[in-house]
Image: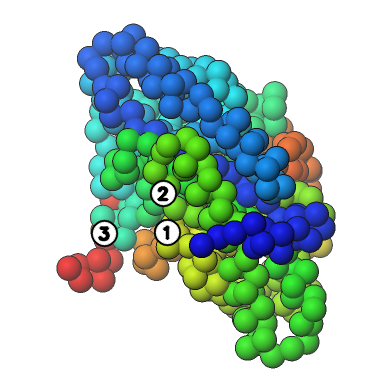
Amino acid sequence: MINVGEVTETNKMIEHENLDVRTITLGISLLDCIDSDINKVNEKIYKKITTLAKDLVKTGEDIENEYGIPVVNKRISVTPIALIGGVCAKTTDDFVSIAKTLDKAAKEVGVNFLGGYSALVSKGMTKADRLLIESIPKALSSTDIVCSSVNVGSTKTGINMDAVRLLGDVIKETAELTKEQDSLGCAKLVVFCNAPDDNPFMAGAFHGVTEADAIINVGVSGPGVVKTALEAVRGESFEVLCETIKKTAFKVTRVGQLVAREASKRLDVPFGIIDLSLAPTPAIGDSVADILHEIGVEYAGAPGTTAALALLNDQVKKGGIMASSYVGGLSGAFIPVSEDQGMINAVEAGALTLEKLEAMTCVCSVGLDMIAIPGDTKNTTISGIIADEMAIGMINQKTTAVRIIPVVGKKVGDTVEFGGLLGYAPVMPVNNFDCSAFVNRAGRIPAPVHSFKN
């Protein structure tokens, strides 16, 4: 059993090492909101969210005050909206009306973000899927806290290249419609391969159709805690290094387990999973890149970086799974550029490139995350970048994702300020050799042969 003594043991981590519970995410099924009348669908969605989530923010704040554990975000994830609007949404504007309802309901209950304006199209697109994807630019530019994701590939089904090609256009249009905010809309859109049903982190969270009517998922963090622990074993063997990371990840995850249990009990909603990802922030000392530096590379991107990240990711999981019976989501280490000061420093020093980041995503939790690129990057180039990242996920049977921001009016060397947890980012160069003949082929890339084990 978890006790207050365990929490007391982490006080130093919280006060001096940026330990926090990054999010309590309430997953809500909207399947019972399906109707042939778009107005009734919007009414049902608003009522269900504002009823089930009315105490979510207060519960998070109460737990934070009672235990002294920072709970940074309170969020909601919902059933992929392409499924909910499949019957009633006949136009992109119909889907946008649902996005506005989600935004209104999320603001009413006071959460930071709501995820699930999503479509799952790894093998093909229904008419509703296509309409939702085409509506994303307008939906994200006309709402404030709604987040969107599209799963375009999986190890079992391959990669839907028709969707990949379409999303190159969608991302550029989203950038254009939100150019007054440095194309911020793109920061709320994630393209996935092998998306999990229970991810509590934005912008990719959605409530999977295999989940219960409502569920509590908690995402913990703590890069600063891991870095501080490693400072004490500087120069020691890999065995000592690994043991230190595992023990630290265990303690961090126990804090998340306590918060998840308390939130579940107080909201009378079943506990789902703990996502034990090391999620950085722009705060000094809260960086995954700094952990890699402590392991022994001068900057993230230096030779040895991928091996160091693989070691870190594996040991975090090995330690974390001992601390909770239900570990899920993404779990491991995020490497978002704009949200990690160490990553930003590495880019500015010339140590970290887009190609090296892609190599690192072979062994980390997610993928190319919060990367600013020149606004004049071609649509097909963006689709090609997405396709490469989806292939890594498909072949390696892991989740990969792309959250890329072609910032309108910006060029390589400029800096883009997003603010808050999103931080700021240097605009990174992109390989501009043409891939349009590849991207413009119709159909899908087949699943790899190992997907037929069953």
Q: Nearer the viewer, residue 442 or 176?
A: 176
- Of helix, strand and loop, which one carries label 1? loop
* Front: mark 1 or 3: 1
- Position in image of residue 101 (x %, y %): 46, 17
Label 2: how many Cα within 10 Å (few below 14, some 14–19, many 20+): many
- Position in image of residue 258 (x %, y %): 56, 53
- Of helix, strand and loop, which one carries label 3? loop
- Position in image of residue 180 (x %, y %): 70, 23
Three-letter amino acid code at the position of disc 2:
Gly
Q: Looking at the image, which residue is at 63% across and 49% down? A: 21
Three-letter amino acid code at the position of disc 3:
Lys
Asked if the residues shown at circle 2 and circle 1 are in contact, with their CB atoms under 8 angstroms apart, the answer is yes
| Rendered view: 162 above or below 385 | above
| Among the two numbered marks 1 and 3 on one chain, the one whose residue lies closer to the N terminus | 3
Asked if the residues shown at circle 3 and circle 2 are in contact, with their CB atoms under 8 angstroms apart, the answer is no
- Of helix, strand and loop, which one carries label 2? strand
Which residue is situated farthest in the left direction here? 454
Read off the residue under disc 1: 326
Read off the residue under disc 3: 156
| Rendered view: 297 above or below 50 | below
Measure the alpha-carbon separation of dots 1 and 3. 24 Å
Note whether residue 333 is visible: yes
